[in-house]
Amino acid sequence: SAVISQKPSRDICQRGTSLTIQCQVDSQVTMMFWYRQQPGQSLTLIATANQGSEATYESGFVIDKFPISRPNLTFSTLTVSNMSPEDSSIYLCSVDQAERRQYFGPGTRLLVL
Amino acid sequence: GQNIDQPTEMTATEGAIVQINCTYQTSGFNGLFWYQQHAGEAPTFLSYNVLDGLEEKGRFSSFLSRSKGYSYLLLKELQMKDSASYLCAVTGGFKTIFGAGTRLFVKA
Protein backbone atom coordinates (compact mmCIF):
# COMPACT_ATOMS: atom_id res chain seq x y z
CA SER A 1 0.00 0.00 0.00
CA ALA A 2 1.11 3.55 -0.70
CA VAL A 3 2.50 5.72 2.08
CA ILE A 4 1.33 9.31 1.80
CA SER A 5 2.50 12.36 3.71
CA GLN A 6 1.00 15.82 3.80
CA LYS A 7 2.37 19.17 4.89
CA PRO A 8 1.38 21.12 6.87
CA SER A 9 -0.56 18.87 9.21
CA ARG A 10 -2.51 21.85 10.48
CA ASP A 11 -2.59 25.62 10.13
CA ILE A 12 -4.47 28.64 11.31
CA CYS A 13 -4.77 31.31 8.64
CA GLN A 14 -6.19 34.78 8.29
CA ARG A 15 -9.06 35.56 6.01
CA GLY A 16 -7.96 36.61 2.52
CA THR A 17 -4.64 34.74 2.57
CA SER A 18 -3.70 31.56 0.70
CA LEU A 19 -2.30 28.25 1.87
CA THR A 20 -0.53 25.61 -0.21
CA ILE A 21 -0.81 22.00 0.94
CA GLN A 22 1.76 19.47 -0.22
CA CYS A 23 1.16 15.77 -0.79
CA GLN A 24 4.01 13.29 -1.25
CA VAL A 25 3.61 9.62 -2.18
CA ASP A 26 6.29 6.98 -1.76
CA SER A 27 5.61 5.44 -5.18
CA GLN A 28 4.67 6.65 -8.63
CA VAL A 29 0.94 6.94 -9.17
CA THR A 30 -1.07 8.07 -12.16
CA MET A 31 -3.87 9.89 -10.40
CA MET A 32 -3.99 11.78 -7.16
CA PHE A 33 -7.17 13.08 -5.59
CA TRP A 34 -7.90 16.02 -3.35
CA TYR A 35 -10.83 15.84 -0.92
CA ARG A 36 -12.34 18.19 1.60
CA GLN A 37 -14.00 17.01 4.78
CA GLN A 38 -15.89 19.67 6.65
CA PRO A 39 -16.61 19.19 10.36
CA GLY A 40 -18.93 16.25 10.95
CA GLN A 41 -19.35 15.55 7.27
CA SER A 42 -18.06 13.07 4.76
CA LEU A 43 -15.47 13.51 2.06
CA THR A 44 -16.16 15.69 -0.95
CA LEU A 45 -13.96 15.32 -4.00
CA ILE A 46 -12.43 18.64 -5.04
CA ALA A 47 -10.43 17.54 -8.06
CA THR A 48 -8.38 14.82 -9.69
CA ALA A 49 -4.76 15.65 -10.43
CA ASN A 50 -3.02 13.94 -13.34
CA GLN A 51 0.63 14.41 -14.12
CA GLY A 52 1.20 16.46 -17.25
CA SER A 53 -2.32 17.79 -17.62
CA GLU A 54 -4.69 20.19 -15.91
CA ALA A 55 -6.59 18.96 -12.92
CA THR A 56 -10.22 17.94 -13.36
CA TYR A 57 -12.48 19.81 -10.95
CA GLU A 58 -15.78 18.65 -9.53
CA SER A 59 -18.94 20.69 -9.61
CA GLY A 60 -18.71 23.57 -7.18
CA PHE A 61 -14.93 23.79 -7.23
CA VAL A 62 -12.93 26.05 -9.56
CA ILE A 63 -9.28 26.37 -10.46
CA ASP A 64 -9.03 30.01 -9.36
CA LYS A 65 -10.02 29.06 -5.83
CA PHE A 66 -8.21 25.70 -5.63
CA PRO A 67 -5.25 25.70 -8.01
CA ILE A 68 -3.50 22.34 -8.18
CA SER A 69 -0.05 21.38 -9.37
CA ARG A 70 1.16 17.90 -10.33
CA PRO A 71 4.78 18.24 -11.41
CA ASN A 72 5.62 14.54 -11.23
CA LEU A 73 4.16 11.14 -10.42
CA THR A 74 4.85 11.30 -6.67
CA PHE A 75 3.87 14.84 -5.70
CA SER A 76 0.98 17.29 -5.84
CA THR A 77 -0.02 20.57 -4.24
CA LEU A 78 -3.41 22.10 -3.54
CA THR A 79 -3.69 25.82 -2.84
CA VAL A 80 -6.67 27.24 -1.00
CA SER A 81 -6.84 30.83 -2.25
CA ASN A 82 -8.34 33.95 -0.76
CA MET A 83 -9.52 31.99 2.24
CA SER A 84 -12.68 32.64 4.21
CA PRO A 85 -13.92 30.95 7.40
CA GLU A 86 -16.07 28.66 5.23
CA ASP A 87 -12.84 27.05 3.97
CA SER A 88 -12.08 25.72 7.44
CA SER A 89 -11.93 22.02 6.87
CA ILE A 90 -9.71 18.99 6.66
CA TYR A 91 -8.06 18.61 3.27
CA LEU A 92 -6.95 15.11 2.27
CA CYS A 93 -5.02 13.83 -0.66
CA SER A 94 -5.38 10.25 -1.78
CA VAL A 95 -4.25 7.80 -4.41
CA ASP A 96 -5.98 4.73 -5.68
CA GLN A 97 -4.28 1.40 -6.07
CA ALA A 98 -5.58 -2.08 -6.68
CA GLU A 99 -9.30 -2.17 -7.48
CA ARG A 100 -9.50 1.59 -7.00
CA ARG A 101 -9.23 1.39 -3.22
CA GLN A 102 -8.14 4.73 -1.87
CA TYR A 103 -5.20 5.40 0.38
CA PHE A 104 -5.36 8.69 2.18
CA GLY A 105 -2.78 11.03 3.52
CA PRO A 106 -3.11 12.06 7.17
CA GLY A 107 -4.90 15.27 6.23
CA THR A 108 -4.31 18.98 6.72
CA ARG A 109 -6.51 20.66 9.31
CA LEU A 110 -7.18 24.23 8.29
CA LEU A 111 -8.80 26.88 10.43
CA VAL A 112 -9.51 30.26 8.84
CA LEU A 113 -10.16 33.17 11.18
CA GLY B 1 -28.14 12.21 -9.72
CA GLN B 2 -25.71 10.43 -7.44
CA ASN B 3 -26.68 9.58 -3.92
CA ILE B 4 -25.40 7.38 -1.14
CA ASP B 5 -27.51 6.93 1.98
CA GLN B 6 -26.49 5.45 5.30
CA PRO B 7 -27.72 5.98 8.86
CA THR B 8 -26.18 8.89 10.70
CA GLU B 9 -25.51 7.14 14.00
CA MET B 10 -25.75 3.72 15.58
CA THR B 11 -25.06 2.42 19.06
CA ALA B 12 -24.18 -1.15 19.95
CA THR B 13 -22.82 -3.09 22.89
CA GLU B 14 -19.36 -4.57 23.21
CA GLY B 15 -19.35 -8.19 22.03
CA ALA B 16 -22.51 -7.77 19.95
CA ILE B 17 -23.06 -7.71 16.18
CA VAL B 18 -24.03 -4.59 14.25
CA GLN B 19 -25.09 -4.13 10.63
CA ILE B 20 -24.62 -0.80 8.89
CA ASN B 21 -26.70 -0.41 5.74
CA CYS B 22 -25.94 1.62 2.65
CA THR B 23 -28.08 2.31 -0.39
CA TYR B 24 -26.73 4.01 -3.46
CA GLN B 25 -27.73 5.50 -6.79
CA THR B 26 -24.77 6.36 -8.98
CA SER B 27 -24.21 6.95 -12.67
CA GLY B 28 -21.51 4.29 -12.88
CA PHE B 29 -20.39 1.34 -10.80
CA ASN B 30 -16.97 -0.23 -10.55
CA GLY B 31 -17.14 -1.30 -6.95
CA LEU B 32 -18.36 -0.52 -3.46
CA PHE B 33 -16.03 0.18 -0.59
CA TRP B 34 -16.29 0.52 3.16
CA TYR B 35 -13.83 2.71 5.02
CA GLN B 36 -13.31 3.21 8.74
CA GLN B 37 -12.48 6.64 10.08
CA HIS B 38 -11.56 7.29 13.69
CA ALA B 39 -12.02 10.81 14.97
CA GLY B 40 -9.22 13.08 13.84
CA GLU B 41 -7.74 10.50 11.49
CA ALA B 42 -7.87 9.75 7.78
CA PRO B 43 -10.16 7.01 6.46
CA THR B 44 -8.70 3.53 6.11
CA PHE B 45 -9.85 0.81 3.74
CA LEU B 46 -11.98 -1.99 5.20
CA SER B 47 -13.62 -3.91 2.37
CA TYR B 48 -14.42 -4.03 -1.31
CA ASN B 49 -17.31 -5.61 -3.21
CA VAL B 50 -17.71 -5.67 -6.95
CA LEU B 51 -19.86 -8.80 -7.35
CA ASP B 52 -23.07 -9.66 -5.53
CA GLY B 53 -22.66 -11.56 -2.32
CA LEU B 54 -20.82 -11.57 0.94
CA GLU B 55 -17.12 -10.88 1.45
CA GLU B 56 -15.78 -11.92 4.83
CA LYS B 57 -12.60 -10.64 6.39
CA GLY B 58 -12.15 -11.55 10.02
CA ARG B 59 -14.70 -9.80 12.22
CA PHE B 60 -15.89 -7.66 9.31
CA SER B 61 -18.08 -8.77 6.41
CA SER B 62 -19.58 -6.75 3.59
CA PHE B 63 -22.50 -7.62 1.37
CA LEU B 64 -23.51 -6.24 -2.01
CA SER B 65 -26.65 -6.44 -4.15
CA ARG B 66 -26.08 -4.48 -7.32
CA SER B 67 -29.65 -4.91 -8.57
CA LYS B 68 -30.96 -3.32 -5.37
CA GLY B 69 -28.22 -0.73 -5.03
CA TYR B 70 -27.66 -2.00 -1.52
CA SER B 71 -24.77 -2.96 0.71
CA TYR B 72 -24.18 -3.61 4.36
CA LEU B 73 -21.18 -3.84 6.61
CA LEU B 74 -21.41 -6.41 9.38
CA LEU B 75 -19.20 -6.08 12.42
CA LYS B 76 -19.06 -9.05 14.79
CA GLU B 77 -17.70 -9.35 18.33
CA LEU B 78 -17.68 -5.61 18.69
CA GLN B 79 -14.80 -4.02 20.55
CA MET B 80 -14.56 -0.56 22.04
CA LYS B 81 -11.95 0.33 19.42
CA ASP B 82 -14.60 -0.18 16.72
CA SER B 83 -16.17 3.12 17.76
CA ALA B 84 -15.62 5.16 14.60
CA SER B 85 -17.34 6.46 11.50
CA TYR B 86 -17.95 3.97 8.72
CA LEU B 87 -18.07 5.39 5.22
CA CYS B 88 -19.78 3.68 2.32
CA ALA B 89 -18.23 4.68 -1.02
CA VAL B 90 -18.96 3.83 -4.64
CA THR B 91 -16.48 4.03 -7.46
CA GLY B 92 -17.66 4.72 -11.00
CA GLY B 93 -15.10 5.43 -13.66
CA PHE B 94 -12.14 7.10 -11.99
CA LYS B 95 -14.10 8.79 -9.20
CA THR B 96 -15.11 7.64 -5.76
CA ILE B 97 -18.23 9.11 -4.15
CA PHE B 98 -18.53 8.87 -0.38
CA GLY B 99 -21.61 8.62 1.77
CA ALA B 100 -21.95 10.88 4.80
CA GLY B 101 -20.79 8.11 7.10
CA THR B 102 -22.32 6.28 10.03
CA ARG B 103 -20.96 7.07 13.47
CA LEU B 104 -20.87 3.90 15.51
CA PHE B 105 -20.71 4.12 19.29
CA VAL B 106 -19.73 0.92 21.08
CA LYS B 107 -20.66 0.88 24.75
CA ALA B 108 -19.49 -1.44 27.49
Image: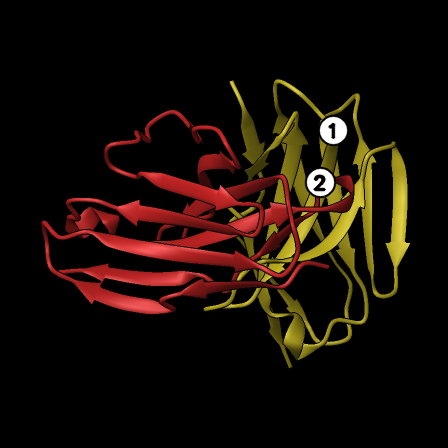
Chain colours: A red, B yellow
The secondary structure type at the circle numbered 1 is loop
- Looking at the image, residue B5 lies above or below residue B58: above
Give the side of residue A105 with respect to residue B88, left or right.
left
Whether pointer 2 and pointer 1 mark residues with C-beta atoms closer than 8 Å, the reply is yes
Q: Residue at left 63%, top 39%?
A: A30
Q: Residue A39, can we see it? A: no
Query: Residue A72: x and y, percent?
Result: 52, 45
Q: Quadrant of residue A25?
A: bottom right
Q: Nearer the viewer, mark 2 or mark 1?
A: 2
Name the quarter where the C terminus of chain B is drawn.
bottom right
Which chain does the numbered disc 2 sit on? A
Please tell me which residue is depicted at 89% across the width and 54% down the height of the picture. Answer: B56
Q: Residues within 10 Å of mark 1 (few under 14, many from 20)?
A: some
* Residue A106 seen in render: yes
Identify whether B44 is placed above or below B81.
above
B59 vs B13, left or right, is right
Chain of the residue that carries numbered disc 1 in the rendered image: B
Q: Report the front residue among B64 and B37.
A: B37
Compared across the picture, whether B101 is left or right of A13 comes to right
Q: Residue B83 falls in which quadrant of the image?
A: bottom right
Q: Which mark is residue A100?
A: 2
Task: Give, as a three-letter code, the residue at label 2.
Answer: Arg
Label 1 sits on residue: B30
Q: Which residue is drawn at the image coordinates 43% and 28% (left, top)?
A: A54
